[in-house]
Amino acid sequence: MLLIGNGRVITRDPACPWLELGGVAVEDGRIREVGLWPDLRERYPEAEVLDARGGVIMPGLINTHEHIYSAMARGLSVRGYHPRGFLDILEGMWWNIDRHLTLEQTRLSAMTTLIDCVKNGVTTVFDHHASFFCIPDSLSAIEEAAQAVGIRRCLCYEVSDRDGKEKAREAVLENERFIRYAQQDRTGMVAAMMGLHASFTLSDETLAFAAAHLPEGAGYHIHVAEGAYDLEHCQKTYGKRLVERLHDRNILGPKTLAAHCIYINEDEMELLRETDTMVVHNPESNMGNACGCPPTMELCHRGILTGLGTDGYTHDMLESYKVANILHKHHLKDPNAAWGEVPEMLFDGNPKIAGRYFDTPLGALKPGYGADVIVTDYIPNTPMDGSNCNSHILFGMTGRSVIHTVCAGKVLMRDRELTFCDEEAVNAQVRTSAQELWDSING
């Protein structure tokens, strides 16, 4: 038994959204009870205690679009790299990296990314992987790291024709293999999807091969209309818009996650809504790549299940919350924009997306839910309760406010110290491996 308490509790449970001095009782990876801290201490006197010391206790965060393979790009200077647009960024940086990644570099990329997730209070990650230098077993390399760290993960490999038909087929088969592995898992910690890059690098032949190897019960994780070229290519090559093409190929649906959706129109939004397709917004990446601002507010207003991701740009979901909040205000010239929609995406949309792949309910502190709990050191200097807690999170916290991270009832970080590894030893390995990767890219 583990007690996490002596703090202000944001439960995300409408029946009891806030406790001024509360706690959470955890047993066998699930939340057993949420209540007042003195009552819990009296009821479970022998339990291990994780003390919030007056800070904020809340559900672990979920990232619905991550790119673990990008971890070693930090500080990288690629010879001759002078991008003039999004396609140059893809070819010159990201596809360049994934064409050199070894299995061991993939594993270390996962270790350092997931360590950062734990430090920022992220306990569930939907990753979209690419390592065209070494495709077979690459998802297992990430899985090995995720098991060592102890967070929930939904993995996929990025199928693409950009490096030829044979590698596209290898990528499909890697997805199929790992999906079947995940479907046999009974820990509740791993799930999998069929990853697809984007329409402009996927032929009808490759999409048909992916569909033929998609295990029952799985869906797709695909970039949609991230750049204007994706739309232009689809219209020129197939005579239709992007979401229409995906719909005609039976890719849309309630188990499919469409990332970005920047260059889509109202008819495409309606197709997303009718098919109950999930969408994930990645504000910092869209801005950093100069791709544009998606119609995310309209997606939310139409009732399309929309979540928030980072696209590998950061591993701090609260940072993405802040950026999304100001991006849409600025873009729409509306100070009211994103005030309610973005926290809805992060705190409600992301758990609902996770609920389509994980049997364990996530995203709230209530009995029976997965014991994914984080504690921040935030002590409010103005009144705080269930009605204004999102404002306190937005303006008062960052991911590095997190001091304790618990996933499935296991303490992964206590007082900002990781419990599952020697962080500096891992960092030393990653630095050495990153230098080898950089030398390979520039060699």
Image: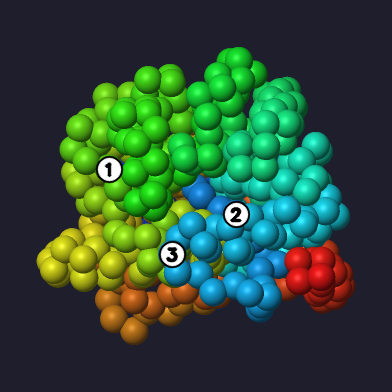
Q: Nearer the viewer, mark 3 or mark 2?
A: 3
Left-right relation of 251 to 391: right
What residue is disc 3 on? 85
| N-term-proximal mark, 3 vs 1 | 3
Q: Compared with residue 74, is residue 408 higher up or lower down, i.e. above or below?
A: above
Q: Are marks 3 and 1 in contact (CB under 8 Å)?
A: no
Residue found at the far front of this picture: 236
Q: Nearer the viewer, mark 3 or mark 1?
A: 3
Q: How many marks?
A: 3
Q: Amino acid at mark 3?
A: Gly
The answer to which image quadrant residue 177 occupies is top right
Tell me the residue that label 2 is attached to.
67
Q: Earlier in the sequence, mark 3 or mark 2?
A: 2
Instruction: Specify the label residue 114 is tagged with.
Output: none
Which residue lies under the disc numbered 1?
264
The residue depicted at 80 percent of the width and 45 percent of the height is: 134
Residue type, mark 1 in image? Ile
Give the spatial CA distance, label 3 vs label 1. 19 Å
**Residue at the (47%, 74%) spot, across then down:** 398
Amino acid found under the numbered disc labelled 2? His
**Residues tagged 2 and 1 counted as in contact (Cβ below 8 A):** no
Query: Distance from label 3 to label 2 (Cα)?
Result: 20 Å
